[in-house]
Amino acid sequence: MKKTLIIVLSFIFFQMGFSQDQPKSLSLQEAIDFALENNRTAINAARDIEVAEQQKKETTATGLPQISASVDYQNNLKQQVSLLPASAFDPLNGIRQLEEYYDLNALEIQPLPDAPEGFIPITFGTKHSMTAFATLSQKLFDGSYLVGLQSAKVYLEISKNAKIKTDLEVRKAVIEAYGNVLLAEESINIFERNIEVLEKNLFETQKIYENGLGEEESVEQLQITLSGVKSNLNNVERLKILAYQMLNINLGLDIYNELELTDNLETLTDQNISLSILEAENNPESTIDYLIAQNDTRAKELLVKLEKSKALPTLNAFINGGYSGYGDEFAFTQKSQDWFGSSLFGVSLDIPIFSSGMRSASTQRAEINLEKAKTDLTETEQRIKLQIASAKSDYQFAIEDYENKKENLALAERIETKNQTKFFEGIGTSFELRQAQTQLYSAQQELLQAMLDVINTKATLETALNTISLN
């Protein structure tokens, strides 16, 4: 029982801790700020910057002194045997050599025995050996290393610009997802109000028909309208669930996290109407897309330098030192073991002379890619100019369309009210009422969409201009 209670309490505390990390209500700006910290794509973009910083450190370190050490132990389980002539070990061999120069028989010296024949097997070295060495190496000159340092800086800039680009896209996606949720919420509210009015009208029309003062067609027309509105309500309720899930994904939350949005569509629309942004300068060079294309051009320039640097000599220096020990028994851990020291200093100069045209071809290939990057940069500049002009045009149209849709809704409401009055006074037909109602419902949805368009086109324009300050 005690163990079960501990498990239950642990689960409750875990759920409490987890729920604290999940926001329950968010304004649009709070949602944007939260997404920039928790969106999974944004998190990985920040990690890419960390990777680039470590890459820069790694590249820099390759040109700094490097120290390595090695310890080798060898146990000759079966030592190799060498064969030496047996005569080499004959103690009389030296006298025999004298015999070639002096006539030993004339001196009446007893003749020497014959030299031994064949070979004697012998092993060299010891059964056990151990060596320990440390080496210090240093680059003195390497053209590719200098280019690598510059490339590491460019790579870091590319990662930082990619993070800004990602944050801009995340911000835009959150605004669109937030707006879609609000659109669904507002649509549901409007559909529910319309259904309430239609049900009341249908009830009254049904009573009029039952009293013999109206036509059955009038009842049927209202039933058709009511059925269509209910069907739209059901569809929007399903879309609302998907809209919340999409927003949660963009925020970096669990897809089923419950949220309450504190902003409303009308307020956000009014806040996003700003004609001053239409006067912003169309400067492509300040946009993130241009900076990214510029980074690519710079990277291609460095590749050209890298290929050219391969024709330069490289100069490296090194110094090493160590000790070696030998023995027929493993005694390297004992103080009596003899160790023999050695050291070496050297300089290595590597001079490329002839590569059969390989370096020339690789350099030309890099130069062609550089020209392509320059062309892409020009293309990017022109595309950004068009993108900004198009975004400004869309935003201006969205504002104008929003004002127009507000006027249209006011007219549609008046028309529907007049036709409803005429219908219940018996001077209007049910067909005319249904037309007015359908026109009103369309005007309501068009106004909601126009509100969303103002918000979204403003976000698109801000993204194109890169005018947002992202922390």
Image (cartoon, rainbow, N blue to C red):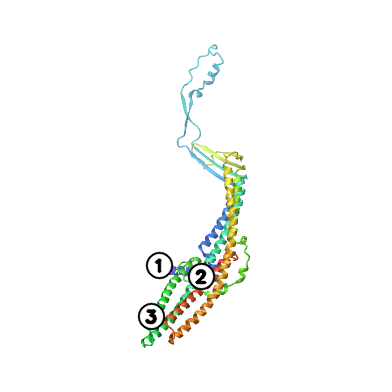
Q: Circle 1: is it few (<14), some (14-19), or many (20+) Cα within 10 Å? A: few
**From the viewer's perspective, is the residue at label 1 or at label 3 nearer?**
3
Where residue 351 appears, x then y in whole percent?
A: 61, 40
Q: Secondary structure at mark 2?
A: helix
Label 1 to label 3, Cα distance in Å?
A: 66 Å
Q: Report if residue 155 is visible in the image.
A: no
Q: Is residue 274 above or below residue 325?
A: below
Report if the CB atoms under discs 1 and 3 are less than 8 Å apart.
no
Q: Is residue 424 above or below residue 126?
A: below
Q: Secondary structure at mark 3?
A: helix
Foreground residue among 417 and 313 = 417
Foreground residue among 24 and 380 = 380
Amino acid of disc 1:
Lys
Amino acid of disc 3:
Glu
Residue denoted by label 1: 3
Where residue 126 appears, x then y in whole percent?
A: 50, 35
Q: Classify residue 440 as left or right of residue 274.
A: left
Label 2 to label 3, Cα distance in Å?
A: 39 Å
Foreground residue among 253 and 306 = 306
Where residue 289 appears, x then y in whole percent?
A: 58, 60
Residue 103: quarter of image? top right
Amino acid of disc 2:
Tyr
Residue denoted by label 2: 178
Residue denoted by label 3: 220
